[in-house]
Image (cartoon, rainbow, N blue to C red):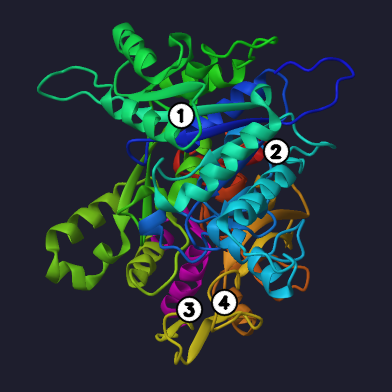
């Protein structure tokens, strides 16, 4: 991938596909490949292809697809783009996530209309509009155009574009993308296209032998579709034996030296270090910072318990960015995170009668934690439990961070407990509440769900320079954080709430949208309407997550005194 001086810049493409089963870690693999390339001095961008028909991930259930990651431009995208941003420290756009729905229907930045709109306008000059060539051409054009968008804050296109194809080879919905990528590989030339196929090498419990047949079949399927892997990235629980590599090489037509083994490791920061061993570059990868992060985490002996009180605790990927932000903050404070996953509904009084064991365990976990976090969510399930968690944190001086819904929960709790507004609620949970302390956004849509929220990076102005939030953000007069909500604090109740002890220390430019709330009488009680987890990075933790962990470990005041 070395470039000659004065040579014309030709984009290099690295395609990552997956076989056998889903959930092998293609996203982390693609991100780690990007890290290795970046450490060699190359500029890297990323594209995620999701073959589903949805236009974006915004309307998908967290239980089914994990969290919805939000970008600066308001794009609601697959969680793998969060991995790309965290690993590569880049800022992607909504167009870096391609879906079948976007190709067929959505408009994108370099086209004035979609394939279907162009057909209606007669742009195809009477031709029969088909998957090949019209859809495949649209896919190729999208990839090549988006790959040229700088995402690292520098001018000009990147050197390498890492493309991850979601799903598993052989899925019906991914066929047009496979064909488009086959055509792309031919058009850019072999020297500019590299295919890495991620597959599984399982071990049967009875036999104890590493089995290569699933990978063989997966590669055969890929080759039948016109794509031949240059490298195999083999997932396994233990390092792959040499004889297993030889067998894979013989049957998959991949040199032994090109068989990458991504075995289970203590933490994902080891993955770029594993891949470094296989990349032959003109410049050796400089992964000193990644080595230090991986070793630092392994040498941490102290843990901090964090109560995560949420709605989607049955699938941890629903809160992936929150978990990663906690990890970044804990490592910065020299602690290992120990997340206590608490289903909010288990804290409710009704649970004491219906599922008493779950009720007892939930409260034991909450009371045994050093700090409490209530993340975002939608719908009324579990809300009473979240209110109880916020009340417990407030009354017992336990460090508390409420994100989006978590901030609204703290407002509802104080309205009920201190102001005596017993039926105070959000219009989301009770449209008939006499005290709508949280209201539906005036400009919001009540008929369409997708892309109708307040989305993307918005500026929050800090109203009190002496508040904890201001100090954690190092005295900045404003912060730019990402949003995803359609309900917000009712400005008509701000005066009453501040008389009850709350202080709204951050708002938008108009001063009417409340963005940050604190309880000055509390060691650390912070609620934010935005999602600070989306911009947390390894080695650069989110300020508010850092504050939560510092408070939970007794280090907050010494830290603030040093600022």
Can you see residue 42?
yes
Q: Left or right: 370 with respect to 124?
A: left
Number of numbered discs visible in the structure rendering: 4
Residue pointed to by mark 3: 415
Q: Is residue 537 above or below residue 119?
A: above
User: Viewer-proximal residue, 552 or 418?
Assistant: 552
Which residue matches tag 1? 197
**The N terminus: image quadrant:** top right
Tell me whether circle 4 and circle 3 mark residues in contact (CB < 8 Å): yes
Secondary structure under badge 4? helix
Q: CA distance from mark 3 to mark 2?
A: 33 Å
Circles 1, 4 touching at the beta carbon (< 8 Å): no
Nearer the observer: mark 1 or 4; the answer is: 1
Residue lying furthest top in this view?
242
Compare marks 1 and 2 and give the one earlier in the sequence. Answer: 1
Quadrant of residue 464 in the image?
bottom right
How far is the residue under mark 1 from the one under mark 2?
A: 48 Å
CA–CA distance between discs 4 and 3? 7 Å
For disc 4, the neighbor class at 10 Å (few under 14, some 14 to 19, many from 20) is many
As drawn, the label of residue 497 is 4
Please name which of the two marks, 3 or 1, marks the residue nearer to the observer. Answer: 1
Label 2 or label 4, whichever comes before in sequence order: 4
For disc 2, the marked residue is 563
**Which residues are drawn in magenta?**
393-420
**Disc 3, SS:** helix
Residue 442: assigned label: none
Q: CA distance from mark 1 to mark 4?
A: 56 Å
At label 3, counting other C-alpha atoms closer than 10 Å, the crowd grade (few under 14, some 14-19, many 20 or more) is: many
In the rendering, at what x and y percent does residue 257 appear?
A: 47, 9
């Amino acid at each position: 991938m070395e470039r000659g001086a004065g040579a014309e810049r030709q984009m290099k493409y690295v395609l990552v596909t997956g076989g056998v089963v889903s959930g092998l870690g293609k996203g982390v693999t693609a991100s780690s490949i990007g890290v290795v390339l970046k450490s060699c001095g190359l500029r890297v961008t990323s594209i995620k292809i999701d073959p589903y028909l949805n236009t974006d991930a915004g309307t998908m259930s967290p239980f089914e697809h994990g969290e919805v990651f939000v970008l600066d431009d308001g794009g609601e995208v697959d969680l793998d783009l969060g991995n790309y941003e965290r690993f590569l420290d880049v800022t992607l756009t909504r167009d870096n996530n391609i879906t079948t729905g976007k190709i067929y229907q959505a408009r994108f930045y370099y086209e004035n209309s979609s394939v279907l709109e162009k057909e209606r306008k007669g742009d195809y000059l009477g031709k029969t509009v088909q998957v090949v060539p019209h859809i495949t051409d649209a896919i190729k054009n999208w990839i090549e155009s988006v790959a040229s968008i700088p995402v690292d804050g520098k001018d000009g296109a990147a050197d390498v574009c890492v493309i991850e194809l979601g799903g598993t080879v052989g899925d019906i919905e991914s066929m047009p993308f496979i064909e488009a990528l086959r055509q792309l590989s031919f058009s850019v030339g072999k020297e500019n296209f590299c295919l890495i196929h991620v597959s599984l090498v399982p071990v049967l419990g009875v036999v104890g032998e590493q089995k290569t047949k699933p990978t063989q079949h997966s590669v055969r399927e890929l080759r039948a579709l016109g794509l031949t892997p240059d490298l195999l990235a083999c997932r396994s629980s233990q390092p792959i034996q040499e004889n297993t590599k030889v067998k894979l090489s013989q049957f998959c037509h991949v040199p032994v030296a090109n068989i990458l083994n991504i075995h289970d490791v203590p933490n994902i920061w080891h993955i770029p270090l594993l891949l470094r061993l296989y990349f032959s570059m003109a410049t050796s990868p400089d992964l000193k910072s990644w080595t230090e992060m991986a070793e630092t985490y392994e040498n941490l002996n102290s843990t901090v318990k964090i109560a995560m009180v949420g709605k989607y605790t049955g699938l941890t990927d629903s809160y992936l960015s929150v978990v990663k932000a906690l990890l970044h903050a804990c490592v910065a404070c020299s602690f290992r995170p120990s997340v206590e996953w608490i289903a909010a509904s288990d804290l409710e009084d009704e649970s004491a009668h219906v599922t008493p064991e779950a009720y007892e365990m939930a409260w034991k976990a909450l009371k045994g934690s050093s700090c409490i976090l209530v993340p975002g969510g939608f719908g009324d399930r579990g809300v009473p439990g979240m209110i109880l968690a916020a009340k417990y944190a407030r009354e017992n001086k336990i460090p508390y961070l409420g994100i989006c819904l978590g901030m609204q929960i703290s407002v509802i709790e104080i309205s009920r407990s201190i102001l005596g507004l017993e039926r105070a609620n959000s219009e989301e949970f009770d449209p008939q509440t006499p005290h709508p302390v949280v209201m539906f956004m005036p400009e919001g849509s009540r008929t369409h769900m997708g892309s109708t929220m307040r989305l993307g990076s918005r500026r929050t102005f800090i109203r009190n320079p002496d508040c904890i939030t201001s100090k954690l953000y190092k005295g900045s007069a404003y912060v730019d954080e990402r949003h995803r909500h359609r309900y917000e604090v009712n400005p008509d109740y701000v005066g009453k709430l501040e008389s009850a002890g709350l202080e709204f220390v951050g708002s938008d430019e108009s001063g009417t949208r409340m963005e940050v709330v604190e309880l000055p009488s509390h060691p650390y009680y912070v609620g934010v309407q935005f999602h600070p987890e989306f911009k947390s990075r390894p080695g650069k933790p989110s300020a508010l997550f850092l504050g939560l962990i510092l408070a939970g470990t007794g280090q907050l005041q010494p830290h603030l005194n040093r600022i």
